[in-house]
Image (cartoon, grey):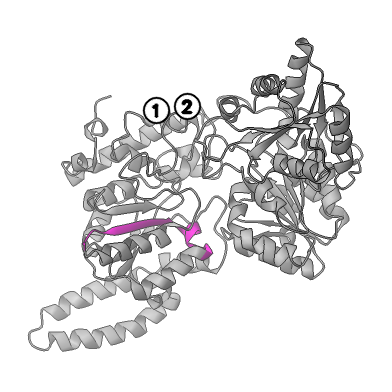
């Protein structure tokens, strides 16, 4: 395809274009993003909103010498196209292809790897301090969304930067939306700012006039500054950023390239910390994404002409949908039930809950630490909070779970979505550590359902407990199952034998039950009789059943979609040691001590050996081994 984009192999090529040509380039970049995401899936709305901003930043600054850090990173597609990845962009989010997020190993232009929100300003402050220590002069630019700015770490970084950094540029990309609509006082403050651009206009015009007055001009400018400080507090509510030590500029139309270029040129040499407030529109340039930014935030493959998904979703409801329906079911019976989300009501299946119980759905914004301690406060006051959160994001509240929930043995339910491989979003989003870090916490119960029906049963079980309970479940639909009917009682720490066998016992947890059953069928064809146990609980284990199986069969295989270190298999190994069952053969199948690239879940399962075929191969390979523990995680 002819056009300006084909001429851009690096930002150096971008600078050869005249500013008048950049609007055409922006259109071509949008078309490229829409075309690739329609095939591969990906973060569409946020990326379409940042095209002009990415162009302007690379036009004015000199990356990779100047450091450009994209907070979260799901708005960096245009950045990738400009920085030498145009030809590989078709592999976006595919196994072996380029990542959907900035990755330092992928390009020198990716100054900092991101995937979780709120990290960019802290990283930028660190880079700025390092620059000052070596007495160099490169610019450090952090591009942060309005929702990311609401996270606690962003506030901590702003507070530190205001009095300690010589030169730093923070660009606030304000589209008035996060994944869900931004929550809280800061969002309201930013919206008020949007209506008050007059402050900077008055400032610029006043300086221009005063500079023309000979002799007394400087004195009048000093007087002007004092007067303007008073006016500013009337026009700009709170003067939040300037009170934190940042010089505030904006708001600027983030789709007006000339205005962006002009403002960036003005601020790039400012000696102190600067915040540029840019207003953008999510989904800009693609009607369906503009009208439905939530639907196209993380979009599956779709038809460009109609905006409809290319393949119909499975008829079965997802785990997230089952969570939402069960939460409604519980809340109807128990007024103490409250659900908490960290700006992910839609993604976690809670939108209908919010419609039914608007006062009992608490959206804290992107503030996971606060969400957990808030839940602890609710639980200490008689409520039964359900914290519904992605596994990878719950990691951020590790201390709060230990200190504020487990230590006090408070009845908080953690509904942990996207446990295991998250798919094409890659290592920043894979939820493969929760069994390890939750299992080591005293007073914590850790469970994983084999299907959506069992998720419903487990939630009914969880809200009756006197202490914290974590239930992890994967992305998608899982095993086909019929919902509805009476809730089945689940006994604490009790597993369930799904298939009998005498040669090997497969202890499968959660998402691994389905491939384990399929593996047992394949083994049967080779005259290997495999028992399959739905473990249900990673903590406490069903010690009685495991002991009986160990004594009867003597060959156990644990399967988990989690890192092996400290996971479900490790706890089984510890149990066998405690019981003195040293002659039992134990094979642990899970994830090795490494991070995993992006790719479809099925592809990653196959690569790591969690597919039915991989499980069969590992069981057969270990059959001759006697009297020792074997770990398979690669």
Q: Where is residue 514 in the image (x, y as percent from the top left)?
A: 74, 27
Percent of width and height locating residue 275: 35, 65
- Quadrant of residue 315 within the rendered picture: top right
Q: Residue at label 1?
A: 90
Determine the residue positioned at 10% across, 83% down.
213
Query: Dot 2 surroundings within 10 Å: few (below 14), some, or many (20 or more)?
Result: some
User: Residue 541 vs residue 596: left or right?
Assistant: right
Query: For the residue carrying disc 1, how many other residues have a C-alpha within 10 Å: few (<14), some (14-19), or many (20+)?
Result: some
Quarter residue 602 falls in: top right
SS state under label 2: helix
Real-space Cα separation, disc 2 to disc 1, in angstroms: 9 Å
* Tag 2 and tag 1, C-beta contact below 8 Å: yes
Answer above or below: position of 191 versus 330: below
Q: Answer whether residue 193 is magenta in the image.
A: no
Q: Earlier in the sequence, mark 2 or mark 1?
A: 2
Q: In this view, does 423 lie to the left or right of 158?
A: right
474 lies above or below 150: above
State the residue at coordinates (53%, 65%).
152
Q: Where is residue 618 in the image (x, y as percent from the top left)?
A: 66, 23
Query: Which quarter of the figure is the N terminus placed in?
Result: top left
Can I make out residue 159 in this image?
Answer: yes
Residue where numbered disc 2 is placed: 39
> Measured from the top left, where is residue 53 in percent x and y?
33, 50
Helix, strand, or loop for circle 1? helix
Q: Is residue 524 above or below residue 557?
A: above
Q: Indicate the quadrant where residue 175 lies.
A: bottom left
The span picked out in magenta is: 136-152
Residue 140 is a magenta residue: yes
């Amino acid at each position: 395809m002819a056009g300006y984009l084909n001429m851009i192999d690096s930002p150096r090529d971008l600078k050869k274009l005249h500013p008048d040509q950049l609007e055409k380039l922006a259109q071509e970049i949008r078309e490229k993003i829409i075309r690739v995401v329609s095939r591969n899936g990906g973060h569409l709305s946020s990326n379409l909103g940042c095209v002009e901003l990415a162009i302007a930043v690379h036009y004015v600054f000199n990356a990779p010498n100047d450091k450009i850090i994209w907070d979260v990173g799901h708005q960096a597609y245009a950045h990738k196209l400009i920085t030498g990845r145009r030809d590989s962009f078709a592999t976006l989010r595919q196994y072996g292809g380029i990542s959907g997020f900035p990755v330092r190993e992928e390009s020198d232009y990716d100054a900092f790897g991101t995937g979780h929100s709120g990290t960019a300003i802290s990283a930028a402050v660190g880079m700025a301090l390092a620059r000052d220590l070596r007495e160099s002069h490169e610019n450090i630019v952090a591009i942060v969304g309005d929702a990311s700015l609401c996270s606690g770490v962003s506030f901590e970084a702003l507070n530190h930067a205001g009095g300690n950094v010589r030169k730093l540029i923070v660009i606030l990309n304000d589209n008035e939306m996060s994944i869900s609509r931004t929550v809280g006082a800061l969002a309201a403050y930013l919206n008020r700012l949007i209506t008050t651009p007059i402050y900077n206009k008055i400032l610029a015009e006043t300086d221009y006039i005063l500079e023309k007055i000979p002799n007394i001009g400087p004195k009048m400018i000093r007087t002007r500054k004092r007067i303007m400080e008073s006016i500013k507090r009337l026009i700009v509510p709170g003067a939040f950023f300037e009170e934190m030590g940042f010089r505030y500029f904006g708001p600027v139309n983030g789709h007006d390239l000339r205005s962006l270029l002009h403002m960036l040129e003005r601020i790039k040499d400012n000696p102190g910390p600067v915040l540029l407030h840019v207003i953008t529109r999510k989904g800009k340039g693609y009607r369906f994404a503009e009208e439905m930014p939530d639907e196209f935030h993380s979009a599956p493959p779709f038809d460009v002409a109609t905006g409809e998904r290319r393949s119909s979703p499975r008829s079965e409801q997802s785990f997230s949908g089952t969570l939402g329906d069960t939460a409604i079911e519980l809340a109807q019976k128990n007024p103490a039930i409250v659900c908490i989300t960290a700006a992910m009501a839609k993604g976690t299946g809670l939108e209908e809950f919010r419609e039914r119980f608007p006062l009992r759905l608490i959206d804290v914004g992107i503030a996971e630490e606060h969400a957990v301690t808030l839940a602890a406060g609710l639980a200490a006051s008689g409520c039964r909070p359900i914290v519904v959160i992605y596994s990878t994001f719950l990691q951020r509240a590790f201390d709060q779970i230990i200190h504020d929930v487990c230590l006090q043995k408070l009845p908080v339910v953690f509904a942990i979505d996207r446990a295991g491989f998250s798919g094409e979003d890659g290592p920043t989003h894979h939820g493969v550590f929760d069994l390890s870090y939750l299992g080591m916490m005293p007073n914590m119960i850790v469970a994983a359902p084999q299907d959506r029906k069992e998720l419903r049963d487990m939630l009914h079980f969880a809200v009756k407990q006197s202490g914290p309970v974590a239930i992890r479940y994967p992305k998608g639909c899982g095993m086909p199952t019929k919902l509805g009917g009476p809730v089945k009682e689940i006994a604490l720490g009790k597993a369930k034998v799904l298939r009998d066998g005498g040669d090997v016992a497969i202890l499968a947890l959660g998402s691994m039950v389905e491939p384990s059953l399929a593996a047992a069928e394949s083994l049967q064809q080779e005259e290997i009789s495999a028992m399959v146990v739905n473990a249900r609980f990673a903590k406490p284990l069903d010690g009685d059943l495991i002991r009986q199986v160990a004594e009867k069969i003597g060959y156990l295989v644990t399967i988990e979609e989690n890192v092996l270190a400290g996971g479900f298999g490790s706890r089984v190994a510890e149990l066998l040691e405690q019981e003195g069952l040293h002659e039992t053969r134990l094979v642990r199948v899970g994830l090795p001590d490494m991070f995993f690239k992006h790719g479809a879940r099925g592809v990653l399962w196959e690569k790591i050996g969690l597919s039915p075929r991989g499980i069969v191969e590992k069981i057969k390979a270990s059959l001759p081994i006697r009297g020792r523990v074997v770990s398979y995680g690669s």
